[in-house]
Amino acid sequence: MSRLAGRRSSFLIKAIDGVVVLLALALTFYLFIALFSFPLSVVTHGNLFLTFCLLLVFLPLLRNELQRQRTGHAAVILAILVVSLVGVGYVFLNSDTMSNLLVARPIDTVMVVLIIIGVFEGTRRTLGMALCLLTLAFIAYTFFGQYLPHPLYHPPITYARIMGWMGASLNQGIYGSLLFIGSDVVFMFILFGSVMDVTGGRQFFIQAGQLIGSRIRGGAAHTAVISSALFGTLSGSPVANVAVTGPITIPIMKKSGIRAEVAGAIEAIASSGGSIMPPVMGVVAFIMAGITGINYVAIAYAAIIPAVLYYGCLGWAVYLYGRKQNIAPVKERVDPKEMALYSPLFIVPFGFILVLLMMQMAAQYAAAGAILAALVMGFLRKKTRPSLGRLVNGVTDGVKQAAIIGVLLALSGLILSSFSLTAIGAKFADLIWMLSAGNRDLALFLGMLVSLIIGMAAPGTAAYILVALMLTPILVNAGISVLQAHFFALYFAVIGYITPPSAPSVLVSCPIAKSDFLKTGLEAVKLSVGVYIVPFLFVWQPALLGQFSGTGIAGLLSIPVAVLVVMTVEIILFNYFITKLNALELLLNIASLLGFMVFIYTRGSLPALLLGVLCLGVLSASQWRRRSPAFVAEPASASENKGG
């Protein structure tokens, strides 16, 4: 009897696998058709995408429970899937009526609640409980905020109006703009990342990192920094980035002599920065464009300097660590010819994205063009030509990831509706402004704390959405531009992923590195302290977001000065530059840091800049005189390594 049950279970698992593949291919085929010839109404299109997302989230969950022979859990998942499908099926049949009603009918609200249950449970089972709890809190506030005291009080809102905004009107909540960003833009870029992986594009990332790592102290860590930065701009998920690149980069780092905790921390930081790394920025740029109305190209352009500072800070910290611990460059050598052959797999698809976006073409068309370019480049060489099975599996994996993000965006739409109905964003802004006593910099600090907390709790995309809704009104009220406010929110939402006690990226890197979570988290903070300062720098000086109008020569100078800020911060933390710092040199470095920061804060204080340059110059001269024999000998040893 048990053997028969096992056969049935095995048959069901295979059947589910087959259905998931067919659904993934069908969704891909439909969305490509919808790009060029929109065959359905807007509501039906969104509802169809949501239906596919629910199926592609719950069917793999059902399959996993069947494989573990947990029939009770499988029955619960199946029941939730059926309930949510009843809801979306009702929308298919009644979309015309529902979208024309001013007040939702009882049956409409019941069906929307069924969909909400599916979206909640799909998010909880794939991305954890934190975002679900936050969403429940906002929904509860929408219903019961009328009973709270000032400043959290909001006027009473009828149940029918709330449910209409939560999705029953089919133009807000679950069916709001975020869902359509998911179907039109996010899907295509996640699929692009999967196709790049299947056709060998990731190999170029790794080789680029190894090429740099073969020439610099701590070089194995630079492999992680470069490869994770390039892959992270596509993946959209810091955790997924760690999971994909970590098993490759962390063992290389440990093999070169880097401690397990440091290796795990470096990978976590490098992977988390993908959301601020242009041109794709892990699809967050497109969500920012949708929320702010700012052109995507302007957002990607503004991200360049902050991204350079983020990864420059990490690269410099890795260099100092490698110098201090005498970590040799990696011994793995990259074949330049092989790297040149792999380079078109990366350069051509990315070139398509950049050119098409600069031609003001919609982001989804740019991504679709890049997907086709990646496939063409992959099929040109026998070595990179994927088999049909590998291509189908790669597309399926990408679509499943996109489905999880689709469900997440649908859930985030509920939060967006709560903000719109209750104006809680403005109330929260008033509260922070009151606590800061109207001081802009104190408001920034409080905003940083809020962003970090949300970044610890919510997945990357959702973290940005939440922080943007809650924090940007405060910053705009403080006289900061919309672009600066949103980048401040995004940057700290990203940093939340590497900040203890939660630090989700660190949590994933620890099992790969076989390291202690708390020690790895502390190393992550130490390696990235300079990164925590960067958002304040581009709020104080808009030129660091590429906004040079009216900044004069001080705006141009702020770029190298910002680089010196993150460098001097890390020198203080490591107490090391060319060699170990003595007490006087440490004071000189602190003085130079303060001088550089005052220059940016005041947008051009010449005495502060001169102080910083003078102190750093004296420090450098002192360090050079005291340099260690190992430093003097390094060029020769590096040459020997290269020859060997």
Image: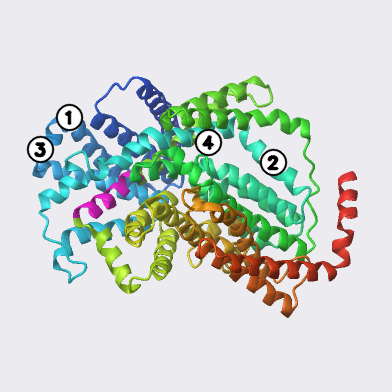
Q: Where does the image place residue 79, in percent across and percent down from the top left?
A: 28, 44
User: Does label 2 or label 1 sit earlier along the sequence?
Assistant: 1
Residue at 20%, 38% in the rendered image: 170
Disc 4: which residue: 193
In this picture, which residue range is highlighted in magenta? 409-421
Tell whether label 4 touches label 3 (CB within 8 Å).
Answer: no
Instruction: Report the amino acid beneath label 2.
Output: Ala
Q: Which secondary structure lies at badge 2?
A: helix
Q: Quadrant of the N terminus?
A: top left
Given the image, on which type of amino acid does mark 4 rest? Answer: Gly
Q: CA distance from mark 1 to mark 3?
A: 15 Å
C-alpha span from label 4 to label 2: 17 Å
* Helix, strand or loop at mark 1: helix
The disc labelled 1 sits on which kind of residue? Answer: Leu
CA gap, disc 3 and disc 4: 40 Å
Q: Quadrant of residue 347?
A: top right
Question: Can you tell which mark lies on residue 93?
Answer: 1
Are circles 1 and 3 on residues that touch, CB within 8 Å?
no
Q: CA distance from mark 2 to mark 1?
A: 52 Å
Does label 4 or label 1 sit earlier along the sequence? Answer: 1
Which sits in the foreground, 204 or 347? 347
Closer to the eye: label 4 or 1: 4
Q: Quick one: SS at disc 3?
A: loop
Q: Residue at x 47, y 61 (%)?
A: 540
- Label 2 or label 1, whichever lies nearer to me, is 2
Dot placed on the residue nearer the N-terminal end, 3 or 4: 3
Residue occupied by mark 2: 208
Query: Which of disc 3 and disc 2 is earlier in sequence?
Result: 3
